[in-house]
Amino acid sequence: MKIAILPGDGIGPEITAQAVKVLNALGESFEMETAAVGGAGYAAHGHPLPEATLKLAKEADAVLFGAVGDYQYDKLERALRPEQAILGLRKELGLFANLRPAILYPELAGASTLKPEVVSGLDILIIRELTGDIYFGKPRGVRECPDGPFKGQREGFDTMRYAEGEIRRIAHVAFQAARKRGSRVTSVDKANVLETFQFWRDVVTEVHKDYQDVELEHMYVDNAAMQLVRAPKKFDVIVTGNMFGDILSDAAAMLTGSIGMLPSASLDADNKGLYEPSHGSAPDIAGKGVANPLATILSAAMMLRYSLGRLDQAERIEDAVKRVLAQGLRTPDIYEAGSTKVGTEEMGNAVVAALA
Ligand code: IPM
Ligand code: MG
């Protein structure tokens, strides 16, 4: 099994180093190869997704990704910005299904900004379509406004679009995932305003005919945002488009109080995947040894489960993470009085020690 390791920028290198350490401690013979991506890719090879990095990602069985982005690259033209690396990998590898679990570990119930009774026991799965929608729709750009009261001025525009097959395949992923959990899917759209999402709703309803054992509910995205903070435990699986999923998954992550804990998987049709923490590159704390490596370590566990077919090793890692939390070890982002504050490396070492 070959794993491509793409650490990226900011805290990316520190946190992926901990996940690699955990993978190495499993006693398997995984082949791991590292390549530059994001700002680091631009600095080394003049492009956020260097050709060699893309080649490695394509030939590997799975990709473990840190995070991309740093202030110093913000002024580059869009095509050279670090974010293009992750968007390019998603598109080039066909990673259309993004799984973002939001789980509240009982030990961390106090870390949420919401009342414990609202979030305790939270376990929801957001499934975000990842290669379509307004993120990739063409045409896009800045042009001369062709009509209306601002005719003749400059205008920015993007295109929201979803093909039937794109909606069908993500709906299948959602219904199948729901069968292994609470058997409920909430499809989030904006069918009251957008043609694209009325179509989305119709297609999801058609696909649902094959899954009569799963309960399907449709919800407008504004209401979904409200329900997520009002009564998040009412959700089981949420399926939605690229743009809405981007926004709702950040909100859902914060329900758990600790975006530093949440892994994610981005899968293609054959379960080949890219695994990354749900949080970003946090350049403000990079290099200080305080970043929480658990989301990346848990992403490695998801990788073992979904792409490498090693459920046993995935569970070993997840159990080890639960054990270090039970031991009271906390990086600063999840620290509470009475627990033991540790740094990035110490946390990684503790997970390795707890693997046993
Ligand atoms: C995410 C991020 C990306 C996105 C950015 C970095 C392009 O916010 O993975 O959610 O918008 O998809
Ligand atoms: Mg996002």
Image: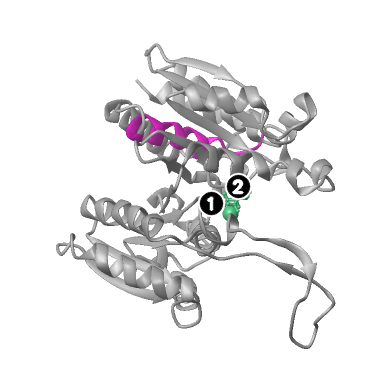
Label 2, label 1: how far apart the Cα atoms are: 7 Å
* Quarter that holds the C terminus: top left
The disc at residue 40 is none
Colour scheme employed for the rendering of this structure: one colour
Q: Does the magenta stretch include residue 300?
A: yes
User: Do the residues bearing badges 2 and 1 touch, measured as CB atoms within 8 Å?
Assistant: yes
Image position of 83 with respect to 32: above or below: below
The residue positioned 30% from the left and 72% from the top of the image is 217
The quadrant where residue 183 appears: bottom left
Q: Is residue 345 visible?
A: no
Q: Mark 1 points at which residue?
A: 258
Q: Residue furthest left?
A: 213
The region drawn magenta spans 290-306
Image position of 277 with respect to 251: above or below: above
Using the image as rendered, state which of residue 111 and residue 84 is in the foreground.
84
Using the image as rendered, state which of residue 303 and residue 129 is in the foreground.
129
Report the side of 133 relative to 99 (left or right). right
The residue positioned 36% from the left and 31% from the top of the image is 307
Residue density around tag 1, few if under 14, some if 14–19, many if 20 or more, within 10 Å? many
Q: Mark 2 points at which residue?
A: 333
Please state the total of marks drawn on the protein image.
2
The residue positioned 37% from the left and 13% from the top of the image is 27
Which of the two labelled residues, at mark 2 and mark 1, occupies the earlier sequence position? 1
Using the image as rendered, state which of residue 336 and residue 13 is in the foreground.
13
Report the side of 69 relative to 98 (left or right). right
Q: In which quarter of the image is ligand 2?
A: bottom right
Residue type, mark 2 in image: Asp
Cβ at disc 2 under 8 Å from ligand 2 = no
Q: Position of residue 4 (x, y in %)?
A: 52, 23
Q: Can residue 57 be seen in this view?
A: yes
